[in-house]
Amino acid sequence: MLAFMTILPDTRSTPLPPTVRALGWTSFLTDLSSEAIYPLLPAFVRGLGGTSVDIGLIDGVANAVAAVVRLPAGALSDTIGRRPLVILGYGISALIRPLMGLVATPLAALLVRAADRVGKGIRSGPRDALVADLVDPSIRGRAFGHIRAMDHAGAALGPLVAMLFLLAFPGRERTLFLLAVLPGLATFAVVWRSIHDAPTRLPVAARVALAPRLSGPQSLLLGSVGVWALGASSEQFLLMRAAELGVPAALVPLVWLGMNLAKSGSAMVFGRLVDRWHPRLSLAAGWLVFAAAYGGLALSGHLLIALPLMGLVGIAYGLAEPAERSLVARLAPDGGHGGAFGWYTLVQGLMALPAGLLAGWLWQLGPHGPTWAFAATAALATAACCLLMISIRADSIRRTATGP
């Protein structure tokens, strides 16, 4: 284990490339727009005559659609470049998301939400691959930490903007949805003017890019990510728990705000830690903190204990997310960052639906349902960490056998 804790040269003075900083702003603006809408969707769909089944179906189908397009989009970017697909993905979301303000049926809401997520699926892998292309491996953690910090800052501000808007203009959800076009257009302008492919990137043949092969270490990483993602269900369950423990409905958005601020701040700080530790060690630490936080939530039913633990969940995300992406980039073959990130985002996306179903089923098992749901999350995160440690051991044996 200590072999992976070697301190790397100090890279604090190395600036992030302008494109990486611009990608941070696109993440901020996109999540500001998206998260101003997402928390309002359940009540909005019910107002259209939808049921709880319709609400679950909208979220599940949207995540599944995004997952399906992630792998081919990431792999295709290894051939045609990252910029075209990043522009296409952000452009689709910018134009489609405001249409939620015009829908009249739950089916129309599903179609708009799914199309919005198609844009996310198209851009996710190419964007992360572009970051890996542009920065030196020694500062990848800081680069991905910057992207994730800006992403979560937008996610924190979005619901707050929505809440303030609706306090000033009660019942005007449709107007708010239509106004989402403004940050969407700003995002597209930043992408068009500031996002450029790495000049040294070597294109991969299409037949190779669209059928990417996984190495043993990549497969082990994806397996551990899949186990963790199965436990990492929607954070709506944390908000539900906060409400059950006594947080007034009007203040629940502040819990969401606090969690996302914890994610944003910790991603900015811990991105540098990832560069100074081995990414696998940072990822294992993040998952263990995640397991500890959910284990504490399973054991405690007191609000004053639960709220700090929910903040700790945010801190765990801030540590784990830059480490995951740094490790994906580290294990990817030359020229194959897009395919590697395509696989990574595909696995995460495919696990979203069963993760939500598992947590929802456990939640309904009587008065102790939340305890079982949080305990399952803690157990799966611990199992994922154990699988990751196996991959560390396997990689160490491989390096010893093949030489440095």
Image: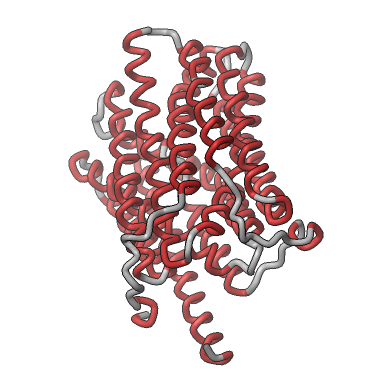
Residue 225 pos. (x, y %): 52, 60
Which of 221/120 is in front?
120
The answer to whether 306 appears left or right of 159 in the picture is left
The residue that appears at 61% across and 56% down in the rendered structure is 199
The answer to whether 208 appears left or right of 107 in the picture is right
Which of 349/306 is in front?
349
Residue 310 pos. (x, y %): 30, 44
The answer to whether 365 appears left or right of 316 in the picture is right
Q: Is residue 154 visible?
A: yes
Residue 387 pos. (x, y %): 49, 70
Which of 54/172 is in front?
172
Above or below, 278 against 140 in this view is: below
Residue 261 pos. (x, y %): 30, 40
The residue that appears at 45% across and 59% down in the rendered structure is 380
Q: Which residue lies most toward the right here?
A: 207
Q: Which residue lies most toward the left here?
A: 304
The residue that appears at 37% across and 80% down in the rendered structure is 1
Above or below, 200 against 297 in this view is: below
Identify the colour scheme used. secondary structure
The answer to whether 13 appears left or right of 139 in the picture is left
Q: In which image quadrant can residue 403 be found? A: bottom right
Report how many numbered discs are placed on residues in the image: 0
The residue that appears at 42% across and 53% down in the rendered structure is 16
Which of 12/375 is in front?
12
Above or below, 165 against 56 in this view is: above
Q: Is residue 376 visible?
A: no
